[in-house]
Amino acid sequence: MGTVVVAADVDEAVVTATIARPDARTTTRHDPSARRRGILAMIGRRLMFVIPVCAAVSAGLFAAASISPFDPLVAYLGVRYTTTSDADKQMIAEQLGLDQPWYTTYWQWVQGLFTGDLGMSRSFGQPVVDVLTERVPWTLLLAGVGLALAVTVALVLGVLAGIRSGGILDRAVTALCITIQGLPPFVLSLGAIALFALGLGWLPVAGLTDAGADPTFAGVAAHMALPVAVLALSQLPWLLLAVRESVSVSRGEDFVAGAVARGIPTSTITRKHIVPTSLAPFVNVVGVRLPELVVGAVLVEEVFSWPGIAGAIVQSARDLDMALLAFLTIGTTLAVLLGSLLADVVVARLDPRVTTDG
């Protein structure tokens, strides 16, 4: 009996010590100020990698361009290339700086970034700043509206399908998502043009406005409808299935069963319990899908002749227009890195169980 009492005393002491000295991570999760410091520290650590990653990507791009089989003089001279003498080609190459080692060209480009001089685009015959000013806003508009539409539809249909797991809507949505996952964005684009533009004649085929017309809200909206719908549809399967799976799992959690046992209405349980706990995994999937969104936007813009950066990326890559191509590549890299960081911050704010140590 004495041994039992001693053991009980020891167990009580251990429990008391554990309560008195809680785990540091548990304390951090429930301390708002400590949680904010942890998130800020995570942001600082992630931002420290931005410059090295961008430097490595840009240097690798210039090095790869130096061994590319494409001759930038072909694009620069056009049809005159075959009639231009070798001496003149050499002189033009020296004037354009094409005869320099890639690391010299790269260093000159880096110096231009720090001085605000982004250089001239050989492909478009105008400063890189002007090319970006003309095209980036249209890409941001297309990608932003497309992502917002995909997120909205994914949340609505994903929640409905997850709540009624195994039902008709769930099976139909899952089958549709699996089908769309196997179709590249350019195939969806061509199918949309064939059906809604050429077949039914409901929407314009391509471009920003009608030929010769100035951009208006109604005109841009009509021309943007198909590319936005295709871009959203191409991203929808992964987002929708993520919401559906997260909601379906949350339905089986103990806190939901407890809410049902207390007689709380189903709509209230869904709105205040299931949906909030399902947002963190969904936001994480959105961050992971950002690179695919960028690639999808490029493909969709090309098919629909949308005046965004897609045409500039393709043209500058084909012509080895490094002043423009390098900046577009770095801009895309930054968008992916910062978008992923933003998604992680939102997830950490939504779910206190997510650690910010890594």
Image: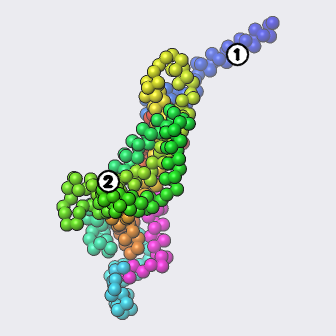
The local secondary structure at tag 2 comes to helix
Q: Nearer the viewer, residue 250 or 70?
A: 250
Nearest to N terminus: mark 2 or mark 1: 1
Q: Which residue is mark 1?
A: 11
Q: Nearer the viewer, residue 28 or 289?
A: 289
| Residue in the foreground of this view, choosing between 119 and 293 | 293
Q: Residue at x 43, y 24 (%)?
A: 268
Write down the region rendered in magenta. 48-74
- Between label 2 and label 1, give the one nearer the viewer: 2
**Left or right, residue 219 beside residue 197:** left
Location of residue 217 with respect to 198 vertically, above or below: above
Distance from Cα at disc 2 to Cα at disc 1: 67 Å
Residue 257, quarter of picture: top right
Q: Residue at x 32, y 53 (%)?
A: 225
Instruction: Provide the major secondary structure of the magenta segment.
Output: helix
Determine whether 10 is above or below 68 in the image.
above
Mark 1, Cα crowd under 10 Å, few <14 / some 14-19 / many 20+, is: few
What amino acid is found at the position of numbered circle 1 in the picture?
Asp
Location of the C terminus by quadrant is top right
Residue at x 32% of width, y 62% of height:
205
Looking at the image, which residue sits at the far front? Answer: 200
Left or right of 98? Residue 161 is right
**Residue 110 shown in magenta:** no
Q: Position of residue 310 (x, y in %)?
A: 37, 63
Q: Position of residue 30 (x, y in %)?
A: 49, 26
Secondary structure beneath disc 1? Answer: helix
Which amino acid is tagged 2?
Answer: Ala
Task: Find out whether the residues at labels 2 and 1 contact each other: C-beta distance under 8 Å.
Answer: no
Residue 334 appears in the rendering:
no
Q: Where does residue 234 sit, x and y in percent of width and height?
A: 44, 53
Question: What residue is pinned by disc 2?
Answer: 225
